[in-house]
Image (cartoon, rainbow, N blue to C red):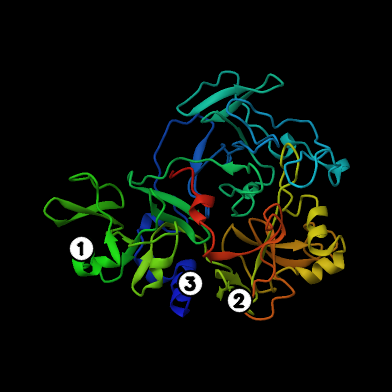
Amino acid sequence: MNVLGVAAILALSAVATANAQSRSAAPASNQRGQIEAYIEEPLPPAFKVVRTDVDGPVFADANGRPLYIWQGRGQNNLGYRGEQEGKPTCGDTVQRTTAGFHEPYPAGLILPDVENRPSCAAMWPPVLAEENAKPAGKWTIVERKDGKKQWAYEGYAVYRSVLDHDAGQPIGIGLLRAGGSAGALRKPIGPRADVPAQFTVVTVPLGRLLTTVEGFSVYTWDRDATNKSNYDQVCQQTFAPVLAHASAPKARGEWGVIERSPGVFQWTYARKPLYTLVGEEQQASYHGADIPGWRNVFTTPAPEFPKGFVLQDAPGGIVLADSQGRTIYQYNCTDDSLDQLTCDHSKDTQVYRLAMCGGGDVARCLQTFPYVLADEKAVSTSQIWSIKYVDPQTGRFAEQGQPGALRVWTYRERPVYTFFRDRAPGDTYGDSWGENNGWMNGYHAFFVREEFRKQYQDTRSRRGS
């Protein structure tokens, strides 16, 4: 384990809050509120590209609502999760029984709240193509079982989420999570990041992280000047320049090169030379930023965390914590059905959450994983972090002024929580609480930096891969 100290926490805090010092090193085109560079491609007339707080550029409908696919993945003899190319299956049939995806539970069990359960298409309306619509680039048209025509992207049928209500804010995606045990999760689609072929972009809690195409973080050095490297050969035992493969690559946008020696070119981003940490083993890591003067590179920083939240050194990494240093947790849930509906939003059934945090007992649940309350003076400064009123007895959203309603912080409109057994700052006793380490139905600490998971493999962006 990498031992994290005060320097590492301060470095991450600087990125998370996008303070003046970190902003001065970032290109103006990549400040929050502006869209990062992407590769343009043909689009049907009904669609466009919009920016999001943490997911980079995404495709959206005419109203700015993000578009999703449900890219399938099989697993042994348990059946096929998600959809296959050219074969949309998300329809109007209401699933009533489990599919047997979540071992060791068998198929055929009655699903919770089945009498109120929506169909897949009710939660994920298919994006239908008009009668005279024509394919464009990677966009094609597939036929649904009911005979209707539906748009597809790279062969996969395209949907909207009924949870999305603000332009450019994909609430339907749920939380930033590994998803390895949760099956085929829906994800927003978007254009590829406009980066040279040697690089890609990864979505992490702190923003859109720039890495090499192999997945390793790139860094800048504070002592470098604009378009000039002061890092000599002696120093290169720790950090290695990212050399451009072509003999004289062309600069474009925020990308450029400097000539380190005759015929040897090094990449720059936002006029700062780029490096990798020699011998780094973990992909998309922050290890290089532990060394004073070195920084990770973000094409777009994530919005600031709510005022009063802090970053806390914890076993296994750095977690987000409330004003008293208590670790913040996210609740994850995907049901065991053929349509794999999420169950982590306050508009979803609360049976799973109440069973996991309190054995079905509301009072016990509120004690075990209490909501993170927002005081009356707290305000939201981004779409991704918002304040909602929740009825604690039902777990559903409530109206302001409703008797007994709690004013709580939410991430992607999912309430966040603390854990009753955490006594000291950095305690994470509620981490991985639930089924399959909490990914199917359970709780995870809000790790800003996690040391024991290959984050790159779990969160790699389709747009940069």
Q: Which is nearer the N-term, disc 3 or disc 2?
A: 3
- In whole angstroms, how far apart are the C-alphas of marks 3 and 2? 16 Å
Q: Amino acid at mark 3?
A: Ser
Crowdedness near tag 1: few (<14), some (14–19) or many (≥20) residues, C-alpha within 10 Å: some
Q: Amino acid at mark 1?
A: Lys
Q: Which is nearer the N-term, disc 1 or disc 2?
A: 1
Q: According to the image, label 1 marks what residue? A: 228
Q: Residue at x 56, y 37 (%)?
A: 62
Could you say which quadrant of the image residue 418 lies in?
bottom right
Q: Is residue 404 visible?
A: no
Q: According to the image, label 2 marks what residue? A: 426
User: How far across and down, in percent of the image, does residue 105 sit?
Assistant: 79, 46
User: How far across and down, in percent of the image, does residue 177 sit?
Assistant: 60, 54
For label 1, the SS is: loop
Which quadrant: the C terminus?
top left
Q: Name the front one of labels 1 and 2.
A: 2
Position of residue 334 in the picture relative to residue 249 (left or right): right
User: How far across and down, in percent of the image, does residue 347 sit?
Assistant: 76, 51
For label 3, the SS is: helix
